[in-house]
Amino acid sequence: MDEDNIINLSIDWDRLIQEYEKRSRRSQVAEKKGIYQVSSQKNPSLPPSIQLRDYQQQAVINWFKNKGRGTLKMATGSGKTITALAIAIELYQKIGLKVLLVVCPYRHLVTQWDRECQKFNLNPILAFDSVHHWQNELSNQLYNIHSSHQSFLTIITTNSTLISEGFQSQVKFFPDKSLIIGDEAHHLGSPRLEESLPRNIGLRLALSATPERYFDEEGTESLLSYFGKIIQPEFTLKDAIKKQALVSYLYYPIFVELTESEAFIYAKLTQRIGWALAKNERLINNENLTSLLMQRSRLIGTAENKLIALQELMKTRLDTHHTLFYCGDGYIDNGTHNYQRQIEAVTRILGVELGYRVNTYTAETPLEEREKIRQQFERGDLQGLVSIRCLDEGVDIPEIQQAVILASTGNPHQFIQRRGRVLRPYPNKKQATIYDMIVMPPDLDRATWEVERNLLRKELKRFMEFAKIANNAEEASQKLMDIQEQYKL
């Protein structure tokens, strides 16, 4: 079947939009009058407790206007999951959608999507473990769909399961009226994953706060070619705060200097990065340059003086709670060439030296243990969580009141995700507080300094953007402007 025919599926999109807009208006009037419809349906349906915000409704309409294709670029925490499930429900009720396939980058996001799906009367197959745990069930339910013994099927899987032979063997049996949702879809632009995206599914929706892949224009193009263009208008962090989908925040940059030995290594790496850039200006497919940038990023991430800055910051804040500490994945030298992971050093300082009740929350923590730790954090039994990358994407812990960011990569995606993660609304949470440790470059020779200025300029641009919409914008921006002036950026 031709892809354009799959997109159309004999759907009257204009009528679908008109009916949706009419029902949305009725719902808004009822909400203002305090009338809430109670649903006793067991079929897929929008929960009465969920009222879509105006920007979410607009996103639904705009995706329909693009004839069932498109990428929602919405700020972290602004309700992409709810918007996507609302689209699936609308398609089920109006065109008889048969299958919903959700693809997530990580296992913990599968379980999180499962929790949300249950609210919509969806009972998903979770395909992220051994093929023996889900393949027969998927095969049976697909058979029931085709023989009309079952009206709807939901599958939630991971990127790694999607590309497996066991899953790919089932994809060809998905009916025409199927919808694929790519969560944190920027991951799906890599060649191996993009090739595995099912071409026989015509209804496609991508979700990401940052769909543009870092230093990978080709991957970004492939992603948007499959799912469809970014649906306008984009919903930014500033928009989300204005609409109260996220809370406002205070932003405090903390400037940290490198030690003498770190500064020496930093200068050497920056010099080699300059040589690599001179030979090849593009990062993509340049393994040497990628490796050098990663080495330098790890060095910055685990700078020794960050631990001193952390101790100084937290010893006056021991009565605080619901704090998230973001660490790098590198190692630090405690001065005796006895290397220790930064996350272990941070946990020791907080827990042993300061008596701040913390636990680690990483990809190595089993899923059940993570859930237990999350509940302890929610209750306040734990004052803080110390994490590496595990909380970057999708994990919903809205209780977080403040964050201390000890390490970030140069990737703007991580920058946006981490800050958005802290701003999710929660009862009695008026605003969040973010402490951002920024490593200042050492003195460099003239040639190396030109390379450094270009790299630093990109970093400070992002910090400035974030400072500008903080509640203490003038104070935060002034600190960063002083740095710009100092380094003549």
Image (tube, helix red, strand yellow):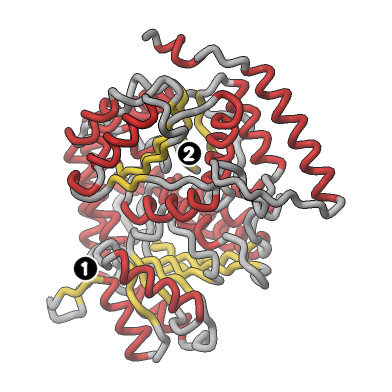
Residue 409 in percent (x, y) is at 35, 53
For disc 2, the neighbor class at 10 Å (few under 14, some 14 to 19, many from 20) is: many
Give the image quarter of residue 471.
bottom right
Residue 228 in percent (x, y) is at 47, 23
Name the mark nearer the viewer: 2 or 1.
2
Q: How many marks?
A: 2
Residue 458 in percent (x, y) is at 45, 45
Q: Is residue 275 above or below residue 8?
A: below
Going by the numbered disc 2, the residue's amino acid type is Leu
As helix, strand or loop, the secondary structure at mark 2 comes to strand
Of residues 269 and 27, the one drawn nearer to the viewer in this rendering: 27
Residue placed under numbered mark 2 in the picture: 207
Q: Which mark is residue 132?
A: none
Q: Is residue 180 above or below residue 328?
A: above
As helix, strand or loop, the secondary structure at mark 1 comes to strand
Residue occupying the point 28% across, 61% down:
363
Residue placed under numbered mark 1 in the picture: 331
Furthest toward the left, the residue is 337
| Alpha carbon distance from label 2 to label 1 | 34 Å
Give the image quarter of residue 45.
top right
Residue 217 in percent (x, y) is at 37, 28
Going by the numbered disc 1, the residue's amino acid type is Tyr
Q: Earlier in the sequence, mark 2 or mark 1?
A: 2
The answer to whether residue 180 is visible is no
